[in-house]
């Protein structure tokens, strides 16, 4: 099976649980299980090639210009983690089917689970660091959904937010580190980066990259000082805890450290940072775990401790440390997932996880007790279980590690951590399952059906098999260790075995086990001392930091984002002006290349009119009608300016938009006072004037320089001019840009235009169906209205103009590909013609003759544009690529047809529909109760003189 399909299957399969949820819990879980099993079988199908020494790769171009490609790689390390993710995922799905209650939405749960599973598989199979980062962030988002699955629990929501905050911030840091690595290596492909060990470690940017990447790894794998989020994530359902916090999410950071080991390890910085963090986390997690009363909290801190153990082993930078780390990753996944599921069974049946309310459960839950005991003994490092072997190997590795002091310091600290690890493992067993039966359990404990204990039972079977016959997994462990080492060192000639003789690691292990038993015996007194000891609480510190920054953000937002548009405009203008001024004074602006053109009388007249209208608008802006007239003058002068500078397309578009805008604003002014109330003081106005003058002078200086200087790089217009006809089949470069070169932009713009019109329509409907409707209908005009609302001359004129304007619109549309025009301008022209019918004869008369709803016209436009773009696929081209040709139909001359016409038709329809829907919506608001609608196109018609006034009123 292809690697792409293995990664894609969980994402595609995430659709199934929601669909199958209504078919029943069995169907929902079965569909989810089938997806994961299929991906697992697909992974296994590639194992023979891996065993033959091949590294399987698959590559697809995505955004090659940015170095972002879908590049996947399957080597022993990736296959090992993918097998853990999919294998344990399979068992979790079976367990979750019976764990979740009927009140839980199983479809939602398994959807989140598959999304997380796909993101994890994507991480371990990615060969491109940018793609890896995408999957990395997806794990944070999907784990947020899983941890907060029980939305009704405050602690669940809090744990999800904490996990997302910590891992998300670490992910942002890691993005920076990965980008630095890519720049050093000259590629974002991992397979290339891993071949540049010397270049990376000799770079001045090695240390910043290392720190940033380790921040991402440490936050994801809950290493000190970021360990606190993981225990709070235990508010999630137990299947989530067993999956995320034993074999997947928390192992993502471990995986990345292992993946980057060949290029990042072997330096003092790596050794001291990674080894120290791992050692501290190992001991701290073990100590805290011993004094936790919640079974899942105990296991959470034990997970933190064991992740610290693995991190420390990778930090030593030795081949044996890597071999031990790989072996313990396997062992930890088996016994820890089994322990979490066992704790979930206890909680499910006894209705509590508080170890103080448990005890004696071996009599009531013998199968669960046996499973949990075997897994916990492995975690404690007892012989004949797999945890013993890797723990002894870890202790042996510490004997060769010297850190910050005497040679015995690291072995002593590691033994101390192992001692507490044994102690909390023994406590888990004894305080939960041993002792006399109690009569005050919150529930009625009993072993569940085999659907719940099957998965942990299978895992503890592996615990025993590996513990008794470790040679069975030795080839796997060595193969994965070889992939981690990446040729930097050879795989150690070490054989996994139960017995290696009476050596120092064995005695260290005995000390840890005996010490653990002693700690268990004195636990009651130790617990009292622990409870009485003041200590910093990581959760409290975290919440304090979050509250501080939230308060700071709130203050800044309240100051800058207070709802006053003038403040936003002032801040934006001053910032842009200051940055532009800095660039102007410190940069090299270049010299003058062109000379100013001589001032003509027409240009001078237009400039004077523009400046005069603008200044007059500043002083008369409170009079809304005058301001609207002045805005129309300004728009008209700008349109003339476009035409003067040989931009007829822009001129036609500008003047059409001005007409539509003025009509729209006139309708809006119908509901507003004539004069805007004064709101600004004289000082405020002066400040605004200073900001406006500075911004205007800056824009003028920049424009002057651009007009007389030369661009740093060649203008893209040269490309458009050279390829407009060859690539788009049109000589009107502006139109070809809109429908071909930047067709995606235009397609998005007509969609946004349609959405804006629909929003206006929706708001109008809300007003007309709400309490405002009565006020609108019964409003009394503040000025007398003309008796002839629909004048005969205007009606006649608009009727005569209608076919002419429609013909002009069709003409502008058809010529637009080679001459000034196009769908956008034609749409505005036709919309104006239709609007004039509404203005001349009224809303009621015009709407009665409307055959096609404007919503449908908008939809037809977007659909036409989209189908035109899709049509390019059938000719082997990319979406929205134009095709054109020349045809002759007798008796006509040869003419050109371009597929862009279909796209332009979509633009035309969307513009007509959007403009008309917006204007129609405002027209509906303008209706009044005391003014009856008329069925006639004009108010005064001599042909109706014989009708009585009563009949006219009724009409």
Image: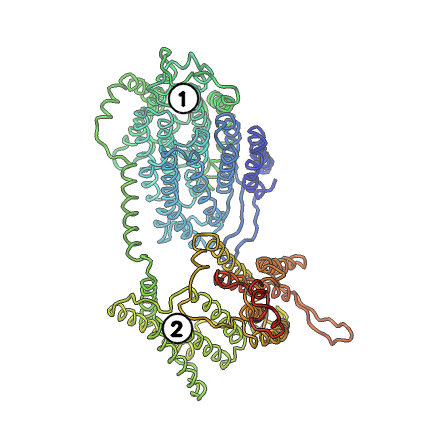
User: Which numbered disc flags the more N-terminal residue, 2 or 1?
Assistant: 1
Closer to the camera in the image, 18 or 422: 18
Examine the rendering and report whether any part of residue 737 can be seen: no
What colouring style does the render use? Answer: rainbow
Compared with 452, 585 (above or below) is below
Q: What residue would you read off at disc 1?
A: 351
How many neighbours does mark 2 have within 10 angstroms: few (below 14), some (14-19), or many (20 or more)? some
Q: Please state the horizontal and vertical placement of residue 217, each as a whole percent of the image.
A: 39, 41
Residue 351 lies in quadrant: top left
Residue 350 lies in quadrant: top left
Q: Residue at x 57, y 46 (%)?
A: 58
From mark 2 to mark 1, how far is it between C-alphas? 72 Å
How many neighbours does mark 1 have within 10 angstroms: few (below 14), some (14-19), or many (20 or more)? some
Q: What residue would you read off at disc 2?
A: 627
Circle 1 sits in a helix, a strand or a loop, which is it? loop
Closer to the camera in the image, 428 or 333: 428
Q: Residue at x 56, y 45 (%)?
A: 57
């Amino acid at each position: 099976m292809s690697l792409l399909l293995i990664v894609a299957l969980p994402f595609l399969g995430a659709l199934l649980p929601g669909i199958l949820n209504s078919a029943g819990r069995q169907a929902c879980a079965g569909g989810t299980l089938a997806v994961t099993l299929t991906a697992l079988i697909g992974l296994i199908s590639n194992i023979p090639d891996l065993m033959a020494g091949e590294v399987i790769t698959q590559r697809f171009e995505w955004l090659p210009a940015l170095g972002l490609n879908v590049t996947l790689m399957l080597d022993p390390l990736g296959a090992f983690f993918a097998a853990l993710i999919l294998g344990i995922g399979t068992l979790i799905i079976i367990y979750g089917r019976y764990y979740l209650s009927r009140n839980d939405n199983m479809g939602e749960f398994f959807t989140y689970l598959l999304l997380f599973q796909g993101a994890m598989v994507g991480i371990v199979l990615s060969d491109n660091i940018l793609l890896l980062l995408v999957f990395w962030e997806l794990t944070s988002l999907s784990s947020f959904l899983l941890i907060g699955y029980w939305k009704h629990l405050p602690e669940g929501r809090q744990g999800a937010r904490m996990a997302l905050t910590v891992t998300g911030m670490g992910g942002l840091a890691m993005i920076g580190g990965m980008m630095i690595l890519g720049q050093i290596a000259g590629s974002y492909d991992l397979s290339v980066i891993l071949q540049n060990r010397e270049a990376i470690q000799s770079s001045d940017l090695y240390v910043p990259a290392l720190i940033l990447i380790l921040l991402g790894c440490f936050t994801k794998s809950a290493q000190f000082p970021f360990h606190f989020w993981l225990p709070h994530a235990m508010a999630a359902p137990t299947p989530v805890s067993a999956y995320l916090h034993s074999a997947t999410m928390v192992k993502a950071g471990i995986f990345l450290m292992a993946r980057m080991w060949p290029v990042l390890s072997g330096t003092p910085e790596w050794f001291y940072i990674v080894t120290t963090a791992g050692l501290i986390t190992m001991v701290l997690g073990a100590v805290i775990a011993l004094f936790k009363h919640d079974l899942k909290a105990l296991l959470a801190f034990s997970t933190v401790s064991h992740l610290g153990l693995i991190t420390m082993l990778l930090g030593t930078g030795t081949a044996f440390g890597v071999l031990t780390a790989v072996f313990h990753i396997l062992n930890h996944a088996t016994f820890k997932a089994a322990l979490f599921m066992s704790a979930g069974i206890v909680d499910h049946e006894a209705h509590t996880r508080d170890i103080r309310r448990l005890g004696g459960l071996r009599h009531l839950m013998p199968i669960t007790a046996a499973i949990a005991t075997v897994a916990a003994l492995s975690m404690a490092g007892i012989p004949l279980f797999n945890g013993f072997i890797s723990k002894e190997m870890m202790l042996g590795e510490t004997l060769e590690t010297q850190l910050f002091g005497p040679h015995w310091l690291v072995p002593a600290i590691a033994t101390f951590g192992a001692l507490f690890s044994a102690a909390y493992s023994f406590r888990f067993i004894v305080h939960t399952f041993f002792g006399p039966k109690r009569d005050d359990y919150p529930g009625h404990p009993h072993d569940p059906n085999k659907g719940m204990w099957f998965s942990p039972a299978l895992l503890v079977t592996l615990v025993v098999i590996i513990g008794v016959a470790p040679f069975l997994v030795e080839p796997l462990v060595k193969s994965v260790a070889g992939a981690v080492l990446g040729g930097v060192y050879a795989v150690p000639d070490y054989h996994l075995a139960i017995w290696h003789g009476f050596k120092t690691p064995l005695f260290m292990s005995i000390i840890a086990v005996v010490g653990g038993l002693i700690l268990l015996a004195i636990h009651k007194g130790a617990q009292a001392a622990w409870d009485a000891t003041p200590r910093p609480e990581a959760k409290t510190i975290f919440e304090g930091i979050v509250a501080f920054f939230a308060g700071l953000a709130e203050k800044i937002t309240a100051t800058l984002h207070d709802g006053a548009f003038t403040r936003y405009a002032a801040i934006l203008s001053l910032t842009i002006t200051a940055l532009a001024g800095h660039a102007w004074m410190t940069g090299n602006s270049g010299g003058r290349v062109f000379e100013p053109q001589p001032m003509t009388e027409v240009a001078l007249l237009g400039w004077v009119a523009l400046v005069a209208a603008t200044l007059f608008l500043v002083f008369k802006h409170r009079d809304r009608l005058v301001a609207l007239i002045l805005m129309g003058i300004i728009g008209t002068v700008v349109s003339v300016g476009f035409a003067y500078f040989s931009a007829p397309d822009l001129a036609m578009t500008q003047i059409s938009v001005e007409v539509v805008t003025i009509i729209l604003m006139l309708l809006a002014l119908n509901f507003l006072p004539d004069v805007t109330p004064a709101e600004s003081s004289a000082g405020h106005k002066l400040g605004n004037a200073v900001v406006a003058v500075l911004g205007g002078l800056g824009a003028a200086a920049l424009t002057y320089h651009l007009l007389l200087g030369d661009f740093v790089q060649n203008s893209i217009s040269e490309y458009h001019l050279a390829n407009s006809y060859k690539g788009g089949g049109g000589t009107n470069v502006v139109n070809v840009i809109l429908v071909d070169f930047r067709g995606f932009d235009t397609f998005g713009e007509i969609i946004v235009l349609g959405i804006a019109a629909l929003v206006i329509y929706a708001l109008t409907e809300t007003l007309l169906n709400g309490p405002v409707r009565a006020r609108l209908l019964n409003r009394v005009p503040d000025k007398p209205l003309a008796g002839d609302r629909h004048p005969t001359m205007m009606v006649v004129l608009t009727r005569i103009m209608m076919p002419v304007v429609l013909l002009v619109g069709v003409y502008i549309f058809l010529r637009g590909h080679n001459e000034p025009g196009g769908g956008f301008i034609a749409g505005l022209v036709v919309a104006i013609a239709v609007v004039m019918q509404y203005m001349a004869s009224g809303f009621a008369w015009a709407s009665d003759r409307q055959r096609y709803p404007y919503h449908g016209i908008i939809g037809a436009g977007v659909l036409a544009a989209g189908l035109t773009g899709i049509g390019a696929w059938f000719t082997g081209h990319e979406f929205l690529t134009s095709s054109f040709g020349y045809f002759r139909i007798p008796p006509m001359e040869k003419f050109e047809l371009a597929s862009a016409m279909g796209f332009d038709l979509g633009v035309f329809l969307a513009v007509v529909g959007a403009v008309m829907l917006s204007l129609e919506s405002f027209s509906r608001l303008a209706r009044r109760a005391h003014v009856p609608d008329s069925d006639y196109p004009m108010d005064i018609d001599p042909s109706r003189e014989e009708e009585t006034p009563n009949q006219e009123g009724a009409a």
